[in-house]
Amino acid sequence: MNVVLWGVFPYLAIATLVGGTIWRYRYDQFGWTTRSSQLYESRLLRIGSPLFHIGLLFVIGGHIGGLVIPESWTDTAGITETQYHVVALTLGILAGICTLGGIAILIYRRRRTGPVFMATTKNDKLMYVVLTLAIVLGLWVSVYSAFQGPDGHNYRETVSPWFRSLFVLHPDVDAMAAAPTEFHIHVLTGLVLFAIFPFTRLVHAFTAPVHYLFRPYVVYRSRDARPTPGASAPRRGWDPVGTRDRQTTRR
Amino acid sequence: MRVMAQVAMVMNLDKCIGCHTCSVTCKQAWTNRAGVEYVWFNNVETRPGQGYPRRYEDQEQWRGGWHLNKRGRLELRTGSRAKRLMTIFASPVQPKLEDYYEPWTYDYEKLVDAPLGDDFPVARPKSLITGEDTKISWSANWDDDLGGAHELGHLDPIVEKVRRESEDKIRFELEKTFMFYLPRICEHCLNPSCMASCPSGAIYKRAEDGIVLVDQDRCRGWRQCITGCPYKKVYFNHKTGKAEKCTFCYPRIEVGLPTICAETCVGRLRYIGVFLYDADRVTEAASVADEKDLYEAQLDLMLDPEDPAVVAAAREQDVPQDWIDAARRSPVYALAKTYRVALPLHPEYRTMPMVWYVPPLSPVVDLLREQGHDAEDHGNLFGAIDALRIPVEYLAELFTAGDTALVTGVLKKLAAMRSYMRGITMGDGAREEVAASVGMTGQAMYAMYRLLAIAKYDDRYVIPKAHEERGHELEELGCSLNFDEGPGMYESGAFGEASGRPVPVAVETFHALRQRQTSDGIAPADSMRGRVNLLNWDGNGTPPGLFPDHRDQPTSTVPGPDGQVPGDALPEGSS
């Protein structure tokens, strides 16, 4: 069981993430968008969305710091276990609350604003469930660790070595199995999120427009440029007139 | 000097009767789809009026276009690139649907389905956004023909500005009010701020004709372009999550036809032609310190196609000869630069817009006639322009960043043209001094009259085709429909091979054809992209691609026991 959960499933999730992203990038350029609903509702979005996204950036940064940097490195740098955990948990909980608060506002908005709810697909709903679950569990794990104090579980001796060992293709299943159940559930939800990531609207994160800082303002392009692979072809005939969402079949 | 060609438009506002034919035909051609119900690539505004979206010209609120920053450098009004990326999670200045209007339809079914009763059934308006009953309270041209102007007219940002500067010159009392129509499309700017704001780099300017387009496959829906465009002519398709904008009907332009809006304009007030411009100096021109110099700076960018140096540079930079010829005959060049009667819309946005307007003169003529003056006499006309019912200040805020002298100059030219032509038609002869009074020759005045008044289709629309020397690229290499699964391939026809769109004429390149005809074996099929032209088949073997591939099952054309060819029996739903 442990081998399946911590030795096989992570690779399946990563394979789906990578393969799915490549596939989507090649075949669904047209569907690759933020699908913004700001046109329908702006007031709540302008609070919730930055809160969620900026919180999330810190959360991601924290995960990278906690999972990738081995404990021995911080020890060498002279940071004690207690110091590390106080800082990590404080920042982590703070960022987690921002993220959770943000997504709570966004979900409330999505449910309560008519047009926004109508533009919500089944795919979105599934994604929201998994994403929220991952955030809630992550926050729960942090709070739980914080209450346990310095004697509590040190994930940098279990989860982090396992995480790093995944990348050398020699998963340290036992280390992960030794972690408490709360961590297990959080990690599993995270893996599920990775697996569905390429098939949801979350893909917009992969095309974060950092290159904007470096490109010229005015873009000239020749008419005869070859279509990019994965470019969506115009369909034959006319698009149906009317609003598809009015009908019972939602996307 | 980097010479580039730009397809541009001039609209003669004197002729616009506000019939909205251009808007309707454009809507039918481009935005009659779900997600863009509220979108009008072409709209006609009554001025004074708030416009569409409401008050879009108030850049203090909407932050569109460029300005000069504290160091005098050209910068987007929304700030630096980093600042825009920081605020990308919820675009701070974004028009809401209410700023356009909530699109609706009517519950027409009720009219037929309602049970028999004493009351007439009513088709209620239903919102296309929520599907609920709705109360229609605004639309793209709600204040058409000054509807509600005495209440809403003061909300026009230009009216506000002119009032501030000239102490209540604009009134909406019936006897003092004025109006004219302003049809608007995307300006296809030389220095587009939508493009500069696009984080993904999805908006581009076509190098051949300067048309500004949104690459639907690269747009990620960040919506910065909507903030960036001061004319608010980039729209968000709320179904696809992508930006859409006026395309200058590029599929028509490429084959030498005018845009839909121009083609269907009943007033024949639109002119389409080519400018040659110096792409290297665009930023410099857009950065001039005084806003009132922007018009001249923009005009300076437009190169004289008769100048041998310009022609030589254009040839060097692969501008095709027929485009250079078209630039020589260009009606837009004539109106904008030769006669200088066409003005850009809001040059103070520093985007170098490429849709130009001949300001309206008509009301002044009617006014003079009513007052018992000789309305066509140039002396009377000139005097009346300053007391014009449409205040020159208002026109100047629209077209010259507030420089009234420029607008007056243009109106005087138009007035002189009437006077001059009247002399000719009344048998008084051509009076050269009328033309000279506005710095023109009689000959030029007559040519301008022909262009403005009686120009035929071919004079109004001088549109060189997309270049034919490159035609082969469209046929065999560059056709955007010819990639796998694209409709340009046989396979994708709805009814099997060879159904669907006509195949381009040059099915094969010359070399592939020769190789096929002279080789003993089967010619390599990779250059043929899976197509086979049986007329050229030498009978050797079975060229790959002769039979369609069946992806579902291994190819077998032997009839099964039931006499059916397995390939024919498609699984359910696969067609």
Image (spheres, coloured by chain):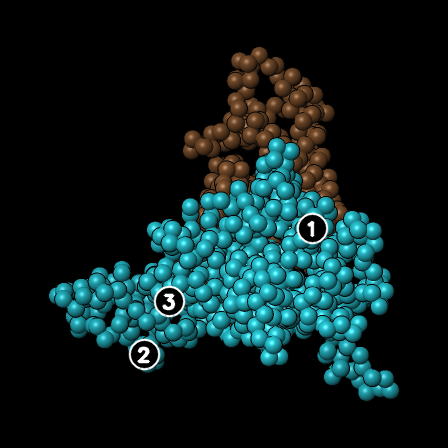
Chain colours: A brown, B cyan
Choose the circle earlier in sequence order: 3 or 1.
1
Q: How far from the left and from the top, in percent, is residue B314?
A: 38, 53
- Examine the rendered structure and indicate whether residue B514 appears above or below residue A11: below
- Examine the rendered structure and indicate whether residue B432 appears above or below residue B155: below
Q: Secondary structure at mark 1?
A: loop
Q: How far from the left and from the top, in percent, is residue B471?
A: 34, 64
Of the two numbered discs 3 and 2 in the rendering, the one whose residue sits closer to the viewer: 3
Give the labeled residue for mark 1.
Answer: B402
Give the labeled residue for mark 3.
Answer: B489
Answer left or right for B354 relative to A231.
Answer: right
Identify the residue at image location x=39%, y=67%: B488
Of the two numbered discs 2 and 1 in the rendering, the one whose residue sits closer to the viewer: 1
User: What whole-number distance in Å separates the C-alpha atoms at marks 3 and 1?
Assistant: 55 Å
Q: How far from the left and from the top, in percent, is residue B16?
A: 65, 70
Of the two numbered discs 3 and 1 in the rendering, the one whose residue sits closer to the viewer: 1
User: What whole-number distance in Å separates the C-alpha atoms at marks 2 and 1?
Assistant: 86 Å
